[in-house]
Amino acid sequence: MLKLLDDFPGANIGPGQVDGNRVRLRLRRDPVTRADGARHDYNYHFVFGLQNQGPAPCRAQVGIEAEGPQGLSQRPLLYAAATLEEEFAPANVGARYDGGRAYWLELDLAAGQSLYLANTYFQPPARLAARLAELAAAGGARAEAYGHSLQGRDLVAYHYPAAQGPEQACVFITSGFHPPEPDTLASQAVMQWLASPQASEARQRLSFCLAPMVNPDGFFLGTQGHNAAGVNFYWEFRPERAERIPEAAALWALAQRLQPALYFDFHAYTFQGAAKAAGPYLKPQWHYRGLAVRTLAADMERRLLEFTGGACMRGASPLALTTLQSRLTRRFNTVTFAKYHLHLGQGLEACREHGRQVVAAAALAMLDADLTRTADILAAPYGRQPRDPLRSLAGWSQALWEGPSKGFLRPLLGR
């Protein structure tokens, strides 16, 4: 007899039923967000466990949004662990899916055996928070509770001050807007880098601040991409609505104190295969004030695209006005790479290395340009921009096609 295990912090599965060795489950459904003329649907992930409570081994047959294996031709990337105290690792189970929401799993369980399964790399939230605190301590960072979530959990940032003083520019890094995405791999790797001799020059001339779990309620509740009030506050970053999104209000207050020169916000593709590639969302350089800052942004973009082989996302999404990165550029002339996507299909270590490499490359660009003081970036003149009207028209035409127009036309185009 099988038992469904779904009452642990971070569990993420919808309603279901167990009948002997057959399990039928639905995915958890959070609200779909509409922004930049498109629908943002994050309802694809699951984390749950099964336990064989019978006296003999059994073969469990699990359908998630599926009644059987018919029509499911692709092999999904799954992770498993025998207990929640163990690290999740690639699962060795029979599995098929349709490239979207439907899965069929078959796995053998000995009497009394439990197995936890996920279609993303799962880290229990308490263990993840403890690991981040360990990494911060190893690097000499100062931990700050910069606010509280809707359910009262601490919002924690880790500060690495510049050795040359508080006037040095800040590199601001966030992750964890959407809990199923294992983007905290990048934050952990950056924190390891900051504790190493390789980061010594950067730490002399730049300060760093990381907020790795900006949506802690989502991690504990197992939401698909929302806070406890059902708000996907990456896309709906509205700090004025503190009663529903205190996470956004606190994060914006932190950002106003930091006045960052550079901002990375990490996300991660989990299962989308070859259709997606790791890389940044990019916006045109003329969004930044001053020739020196635009030149720096162009140099950073060049270095990052060399690392990704040219993979990136352009169009309307990087320009969405209701995001933190857009507010940062308008207010502080911050060069932003948000969202910066890892890809779980490349492996855990590749995700870690990717996050470390791109932050180090962007920081090196600031050092090479000798643009490492907050005042120099804030003082950049406005001027008229862009000066090339044809390039402006081309850029906004591309943004319109990639965002609102495609959002309206998707049903007609069958996409």
Image: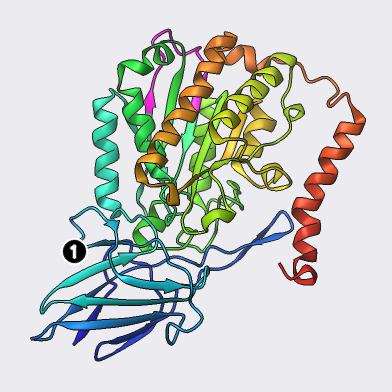
Q: Position of residue 236 (x, y in %)?
A: 61, 53
Q: Residue at x 39, y 18 (%)?
A: 161
* The image quarter in which residue 297 lies: top right
* The image quarter in which residue 350 lies: top left
Query: Vertically, is 147 above or below 120?
Result: above
Q: Is residue 127 left or right of residue 335?
A: left
Q: Residue at x 29, y 69 (%)?
A: 93
Q: Give, as a three-letter code, the residue at label 1.
A: Ala
Q: Position of residue 39 (x, y in %)?
A: 66, 63
Q: Is residue 2 magenta?
A: no
Q: Is residue 396 left or right of residue 213?
A: right
Residues 172 and 195: in front is: 195
Number of on-image labels? 1
Q: Position of residue 363 (x, y in %)?
A: 50, 20
Instruction: Please say whether residue 179 is visible from this viewpoint.
Output: yes
Q: Residue at x 23, y 82 (%)?
A: 59
Q: Position of residue 290 (x, y in %)?
A: 74, 17
* The image quarter in which residue 327 lies: top right
Q: Is residue 361 left or right of residue 414?
A: left
Query: Vertically, is 237 above or below 170?
Result: below
Task: Please rate how many residues cluster around mark 1, counting C-alpha atoms within 10 Å: few if below 14, some from 14 to 19, many from 20.
Answer: some
Tag 1 residue: 82
Residues 8 and 332: in front is: 8
The magenta stretch is: 159-171
Q: Residue at x 21, y 77 (%)?
A: 108
Query: Vertically, is 365 above or below 183?
Result: above
Image quadrant holding the C terminus, namely bottom right
Instruction: Please say whether residue 146 is visible from this viewpoint.
Output: no
Secondary structure state at the residue bearing disc 1: loop
